[in-house]
Every structure is written in structure tokens, then in C-alpha cells.
Image: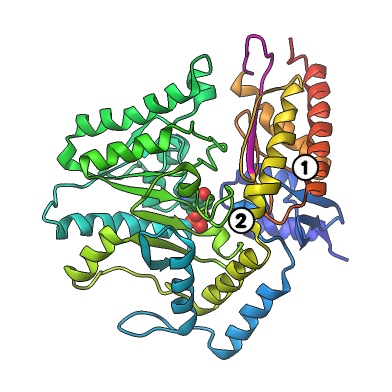
Amino acid sequence: MINTKEIQALDSAHYMHPFTAHRELAQKGARVMVKGEGIYLWDSEGKKLLDGMSGLWCINVGYGRKELADAAYKQLLELPYYNSFFNTTTIPPVQLAKLLAEVTPPQFRHVFYAGSGSEGNDTIFRMVRWFWDLEGQPQRKVIIGRKNAYHGSTVCGTSLGGMSGMHEQGDLPIPGIAHIEQPYWFDLARDTDKDEFGLQAAGWLETKILELGPDKVAAFIGEPVQGAGGVIIPPATYWPEIQRICDKYGILLIADEVITGFGRTGNWFGCVTFGFKPDFINFAKGVTSGYVPLGGVMVGERVARVVIEKGSDFNHGYTYSGHPVACAVAIENIHIIQREKLVERVRDDTGPYLKQKFEGLKDHPLVGEAETCGLMAGLVLVKSKKPVTMFDPKLAVGMVCRGHMFGNGMIMRAVGERMIIAPPLIMTRAQIDEMIDLIRFCLDATLSDLQGRGWMN
Ligand SMILES: *Cc1c(COP(=O)(O)O)cnc(C)c1O
């Protein structure tokens, strides 16, 4: 038997967790996860949970895949590590590079490996500036990102991202990064036409470019769908207009696909779903389904040609760039996605089915909006619907709802008043039914709780 209390005591005595308030953690004790199978997790008290978040957006092929464990084991015995610095390589990163060139859009033939999504963005930041130096335009330095974007937690990733709470710790962003408002229709413009709003929101990029000076701007970075920001799905008009503006000023376009890559939106990459052609794709999470850490940057031919032909050494790289074990797992993970046709399944079957079921939650008194993209979805908790009245953010009703979800065996994340999911791509229709029933049950529990507190009208 696992002694939960003992683990919790050791945890709070020695383990500093990411994104955690430690005094609160010490009081409550961490929930200890001990096993996973398919879309389910078990904690140390034997409680079963439906993992609506795929871990942290990464367990795309589900827990307990023996094929992935075997791929790692085989490579660990054969050659656990050698680096790719100074004209050497191992075999798995080469084979994975070929596979990635096949599953990414045609403008991509080259990959630079990192160990995580944050590191990938650091690589992009440096490669973008190197590219413009080689192009004879070293004054192009500024990268434009968006408010409420998440691009990781290193100094550079935090700076590119637009989370104000993260910027406050450490005097960020670093110089050379600017931000525009996010394309969040429900929050900013729910009384107007969605497609019109998409064009308007993309127009903020052009305004910022003109303000900074078009010859100073190096690149624009965005997540096709903002994940950590709350599954903010942009209007269909948004990305094609962003593309047009980037093209007009010759600015590089970076898609941070750490969440949207590898089938999440119903195509291999979100840029395909939203119809734009980036110069970089940053990936991580789903590339190995989170079984081992791996990230990387797909470098489009426009940049690759210049840095390969004109560049000398790129004075940049990580000890674990192209780690053979991580790459071996990634290869098998992509093979599973291909064999089980998970991308097609999300696009043609489970994605549309989730959409129908999840949007059906709009009839619940607490739900002001419910939307999906592939197998990611978000709903907004509101105090009343006609007209829409939001809760006081200080009440943190999202966290109240999250508590009821966890308590009843459903992992759903709260971002302010947005409740979000991104379940494993192996999910079946029957499991979607089970999940929607659970969510509805927990929304009911949340509603009576909020009524009991006197927080409803
Ligand atoms: C998670 C995430 C990152 C950071 O990835 P890490 O592996 O945690 O460094 C970067 N960008 C996006 C879009 C993410 O969702």
C-alpha cells in the first residue's frame, strides 16, 4: 500500500513544484498520481479520474502504451546517449527528422531539436535574429506576440508570452518583444460579428507594425489556438489576415504548435486547420505524447536556405538536442498516430462528435459559451445569460467548479471563468458520452454550491 500522508509530508518538505503556491500545497497535501491506462488516471487513494487534459496537453496516444516503453528500452540498451554537436549524430534523430518533414506542411524540410517547448522558443528567438543578420537587415529585432499567450517559462518564453502575472516576476519581458491584444471574441466583442472581429483583431498586428516601424519588426508569434490562455479559438478570418499582413511587410510568421501539433485540431498541425503558412513551427508535448521530454523547431525553407547557405556556426544548441531515446519514442509515437489514424479520427469522427456534445452544454444555466476545435474545448461560466453577466473574478468560480470536477473524477482545468479540456486523441465516442455526462453532473454540483453561497442572482 502507498502511504499517501507520508508522500505528501516529504513532498511539502523537499519538493518545489512548478506554478504552485507552496503554503497552500503544504496545508492541503498534493494529490499523488500513481497509475495511468488509456484516458484514465488513478491516485494513491485508489480514486479513478478521467483525464480530460491529457496530462498537460501531451498524452495524445493515452497512458500505458507498451510500444513506447519498448522503443525507449531498446534504445536505452543500444545507445542511451550521444550528442549531435560537432559533426556527429545518432540514428533516431535522423529518422525522426525525415518523419517530421513528411507530416509537417511542405515548406518544412529541416528540424532543430530542443528538450522542451520553452527551449524551442529560445531557439526561434535566436534563429530569427541570426536570419535577419544574414539577410543584411540586423535592425529587424522585434518579435510581436500576444497578450494571454503562453510560450513557455524560460526568460525568453515568458517574454514572448503575454501572461502579466509571469511578467511581474523577474521584470519581464526582455527588450525587443512587443504584444498585441488576443483574438478573444467572447470577452472583447461578443455583441459583434465574429468574422468581422477576426479581421479587426488581426489588424492590431498591422497597427503595431506601423507603430514600431516595419523595418524594425522581425517576426510574429502565435499559438493557432491559445491553450494555457483558456482554449481561445480565433475566428476563421483571423489567421489568413495575419498571414497577409506578415507577407505584406516581409515579417516571419511563427506558429507555436506545442499544443496544437500532432493531431489535436484534426490535422497534423493547427496551421493547416486555420489555413496559414508559417516560417517556423515550434513543437513539444504531443511529439512523444509526453512519455519523455522532447521539443523542437521546424525551420521553413525561407529561413533554412539562408542560414544553411550563408551562415557559419550557429552558436547555439542543447546537450539533449536530438536525444536518441526521446527521438526513438517520438518515432514510435508518430507511427501509432499513423497506424491508428488518430488525426483522421479527430477530424472526421470524434472531433465533430465532441463539438455536437460539448456545444450541447450551452443549455446549462451556468454556461454562457461552449466551443471546440478538434479535441480541445472550452466553456465560459456565467452568472446569468440574458444579458450575459460575468462573475466577479475575485470569487474564482472556475476553481470552485474545478474542485467539483476533480472530486467527482473528472480532470477539467480552470482558466479564470473558462473551463477547458484537451482529452487524449484515442478517446472513443462512448468515452466522450461518459465525459460529457460527468461534466454536466459537476456543473449541476457547481450550480447548487454557488446558489448555496448566495453567488447567483
Ligand atoms: C506548454 C507550452 C510551451 C512550453 O513547453 P515546455 O515543454 O513546458 O517548456 C510553449 N508553448 C506552448 C504553446 C505551450 O503550450
Please tell me whether mark 2 sits on a helix, a strand or a loop: helix
Mark 2 — residue? Answer: 343
Residue 59 shows in this picture: no
Is residue 369 among what the camera can see? Answer: yes
Of labels 1 and 2, the one closer to you: 2
Q: Is 176 located above or below residue 391 in the figure?
A: below
Q: Which residues are magenta?
A: 376-391
Locate residue 18, reporting x and y percent: 56, 52
Q: Who's the residue at 62% across and 17% down the image?
A: 390
Task: Note whether 332 is above or below 363 in the view shown.
Answer: below
Q: Is residue 105 left or right of residue 77?
A: left
Dot 1: within a 10 Å radius of its alpha carbon, few (fewer than 14), some, or many (20 or more) residues? some
Q: Tag 1: residue type? A: Phe
What residue appears at the point 62 percent right and 48 percent down from the top-left corner? 347
Amino acid type, label 2: Val
Q: Dot 1 corresponds to which residue?
A: 406
Task: Name the quadrant of the C terminus.
Answer: top right
x%, y% of residue 377? Answer: 64, 38
User: Which residue: 30% across, 61% down?
Assistant: 301
Q: Nearer the viewer, residue 107 or 246?
A: 107
- Earlier along the polypeptide chain: callout 1 or callout 2? 2
- Give the image location of residue 432, x and y in percent: 77, 44
Say whether mark 1 is within 8 Å of ligand 1: no
Q: CA distance from mark 1 to mark 2?
A: 28 Å
Asked if residue 159 lies in the magenta stretch, the reply is no
Question: Which residue is located at x 81 percent, y 57 percent?
Answer: 42
> In the image, residue 236 lies at what x, y percent?
48, 33
230 on left or right of 221: right
Quadrant of the drawing holding the N terminus? bottom right
